[in-house]
Image: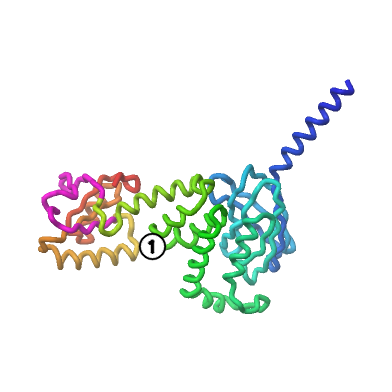
Amino acid sequence: MKKSSILILIIICLVGCKKGSNETTITGEIKGLGTDTLYLYGMDELYDRIDTIYVENDKFSYTTSVDTITSAYLLLKNRIEYPVFLDKGNKIKIKGDTINLNFLTISGNIYNEEFTDFQKALEDPADPSEKASEETVDKRITVEKANTAEEMAEEFILQHHSSYVSLYLLDKYFVQKETPDFSKIKKLVEVMTGVLQDKPYIERLNETITQAEKSEIGKYAPFFSLPNAKGEKITRSSDAFKQKSLLINFWASWNDSISQKQSNSELREIYKKYKKNKYIGMLGISLDVDKQQWKDAIKRDTLDWEQVCDFGGLNSEV
């Protein structure tokens, strides 16, 4: 009986230790927050939930559990997303001030410390204790600073092949740009270790890079066969496009943005100028799902060049 009691006690201890080892505690103090609510959610499917963290008197404390290194966002006031890196057993500490929510000091593991150091290097040399106006802060976000941040992010990635911070910087400074440079992104991905390259995010990014490479300037457009308004199948080798450089534009009737209206206006001018040219052709590929709306938009917007659509919407094969 005594042996059984000892065995049960050992099992209870082991289970308790195992459970506790996955726990990660997050404690913080951000001056000026007062009473507020923060949200913690994952950058990917490894942390597929949203946790609510309550702040009282500028301070907060929260315990969560993770099985492995996890990249997450802490959503602060003014919709600011701040990266936090979690691992089982970590005791994460966060300090900051609402004067500058774009810079927090986070410790608890090497990745948080690496990102804190990176942010320190980006900080304006002005005295952080001086309360800056919103207008002053906005003025500091210049093109020059943005370029510097991108250069520093690239240097960091090249020097930290296995850091989860590199994944975050890759996404923020290169992938999320209005016009991503996929050749540069590919080079940065290639220097990363296998642990990072096996992440679902990188796998999806590699697929995007492959598709982008197919549509680079100077590359042949991939084969397609799509119906026009008359039901005729149009391909890149159709008689109307033989021996021609083909300008392809993608659009949709449901996109009534100013940018598309401006694009259509510019395309009409191009068509007017080159419609009789023997070496230049134009083709519009729509991402519509409704045939009648598509036809109405062609007429309404005077899109007189060849138009095709398979009505697959954003799931269109092309």
Residue 193, position as x, y percentages in the image: 52, 49
Q: In this view, does 110 lie above or below 121?
A: above
Q: For the point 65% across and 60% down, which residue is it?
A: 113
Count how many numbered circles sit on residues in the image: 1
In the rendered view, would you say 3 is above or below 52? above
Magenta highlight range: 222-250
Identified at 69% across, 43% down, the residue is 22
210 vs 248, nearest the viewer: 210
| Residue at x 13%, y 63% (from the top left corner) | 275
Q: Residue 158 or 79: which is nearer the viewer?
A: 158
Residue 234 lies within the magenta run: yes
Question: For mark 1, does the 10 Å Cα neighbourhood hold few (<14), some (14 to 19), or many (20 or more) residues?
Answer: few
Residue 280 % position (x, y): 15, 61
Determine which residue is flagged by label 1: 179
Q: Identify the residue at horizontal 29%, vertical 64% (top origin).
A: 261
Q: Where residue 45 sits in the image (x, y, percent)?
A: 54, 45
- Rendered image quadrant of residue 27: bottom right
Give whichever of 156, 167 is nearer the camera.
Answer: 156
For residue 277, above or below residue 199: below
Q: Is residue 154 magenta?
A: no
Q: How is the image coloured?
A: rainbow
| Extreme residue toward the right, this view | 2
What residue type is disc 1 on?
Thr
| Residue 109 appears left or right of 265 | right
Q: Nearer the viewer, residue 78 or 188?
A: 188
